[in-house]
Image (tube, helix red, strand yellow):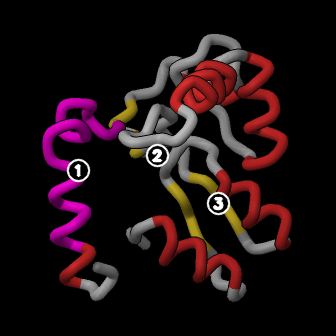
Amino acid sequence: MLGNLPETYLRVTIGELAIFSAAPNVYWRQARETGAAFVPVETVKPLVVQQTNAGLLKGARTPNTAKLLAVYLMSLEGQALWEELQGQTSMFIDGTPNNRYVQGKEIVALDSKFGAEQLDQLTEKYGRMVGFR
């Protein structure tokens, strides 16, 4: 079954078998914690991976605090806390579980140019289409 993560996760939580093709993330953790039938597919090429970005938002009231938090999240200590609380780590930071997981695997992730140039306008467009904007 192919599907987007939220839809597939919903099927996991209501007791249907779901198979994910992605690097470990919060959905894996939640599925396992709920006892859902869950099998990650690790032989798919390329693996489609989910990214979480940390950075300073335009107009932040406390920009220095926001910068410090973003930097902290990129440290091994911050990654350990992120894993404990969210069940995920960065695949780009040496020594993290997700970094070790993707070694030797072919992966596909959101292109930074796409994120910088098109993500906001497409988020707005699709949000209007489905009634979120």
- Check the image and report above or below for 109 versus 22: above
Q: Residues within 10 Å of mark 2 (few under 14, many from 20)?
A: some
Q: Which residue is mark 3?
A: 27
Q: Which residue is mark 1?
A: 119
Image check: 4 left or right of 19?
left
Tag 2: amino acid:
Gln
User: Which numbered marker is on residue 50?
Assistant: 2
Measuring from the top left, give residue 39's x and y in whole percent: 66, 59
Magenta span: 109-126
Element at badge 3?
A: helix
Q: CA distance from mark 3 to mark 1?
A: 23 Å
What is the quadrant of residue 71 in the picture? top right
Measuring from the top left, give residue 15's x and y in whole percent: 71, 85
- Check the image and report above or below for 77 versus 23: above
User: Which numbered marker is on residue 59?
Assistant: none
Residue drawn at x 57%, y 32% is 66
Q: Nearer the viewer, residue 27 or 112?
A: 112
Q: Earlier in the sequence, mark 2 or mark 1?
A: 2
Q: CA distance from mark 2 to mark 1?
A: 14 Å
Q: Nearer the viewer, residue 84 or 9?
A: 84
Q: Main secondary structure of the magenta part?
A: helix
Q: CA distance from mark 2 to mark 3?
A: 11 Å
Q: Nearer the viewer, residue 67 or 60?
A: 60
